[in-house]
Image: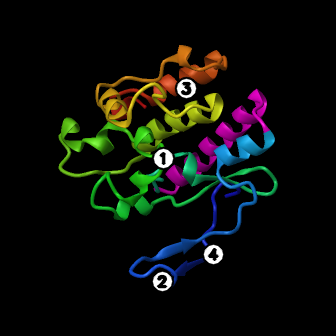
Amino acid sequence: HRHICRMVGVDRKSLTGLTCVVLPWMSYGSVMQYMTKVGWFSQDAIRLIYQVVSGLAYLHEKGVSHGDLHVGRILVDVARDVRLADFGLANFADSAMSCSSALPGATRCMAPEIIDPTLFQLQRVRHTPASDMYSFGQVSWQIYTGEIPFPDLAICQAILAILEGKGQERSLSGRDVPDALWDVMEACWHFEPSRR
């Protein structure tokens, strides 16, 4: 699929004790690096968001959950198209607080059932298309507004906001989020996974 980043290899030697996935070079880097380089335009942000959901839909049709969707996992190629990277890797982690969580903004994109599965009567973290859709809502917010999710909250407060079922404050964005996009984001932030 054109919005999925293909893996070109595995490296077990560069970092002692770690296995690294090797991806093709993406000249624009992450989606936020791309936006910084080329500037923000409403139609471009919407195009990128559409490409993200197109890639996610493809994964979900194949029975794969991304499991760690945040802007650091959304790369932009030389043609200025989105490529989802590192999908499915979170399913190998023992908990939500895997190494991916150390990346800026990653935790702010996690669904409540990933942060605390016990709230949903789950015994362990289980990445699903519904948890991906929660993350997609957060990523869409970030791509369109240029703000991290819950920009006015410290990370611990942001986690509590997620666990309390709160979404983003539309007024916190200096950019006017179109109504249709806002409706999609709000649907993605629904606390109950089955309603996303």
Kind of residue indicated by mark 4: Val
User: Which mark is in front, 3 or 1?
Assistant: 1
Residue 12, label in figure: 2
Q: On the image, numbered disc 1 is attached to which residue?
A: 104
Residue 87's x, y, as percent? 50, 58
Disc 3 to disc 1, how far (Cα)? 24 Å
The mark that comes first in sequence, 1 or 4, is 4
Say which amino acid is labelled 2: Arg
Residue highlighted by disc 4: 8
Q: Is residue 134 above or below residue 92?
A: above
Q: Are marks 4 and 3 in contact (CB under 8 Å)?
A: no
Report, in whole angstroms, how far the alpha carbon at label 1 lies from the one at label 4: 25 Å
Crowd tier of the residue under label 3, counting other residues whose Cα lies within 10 Å: few below 14, some 14–19, many 20 or above? some
Give the CA separation, mark 2 to mark 1: 25 Å
Q: Which residue matches tag 3? A: 184
Nearer the viewer's eye, disc 2 or disc 3? 2
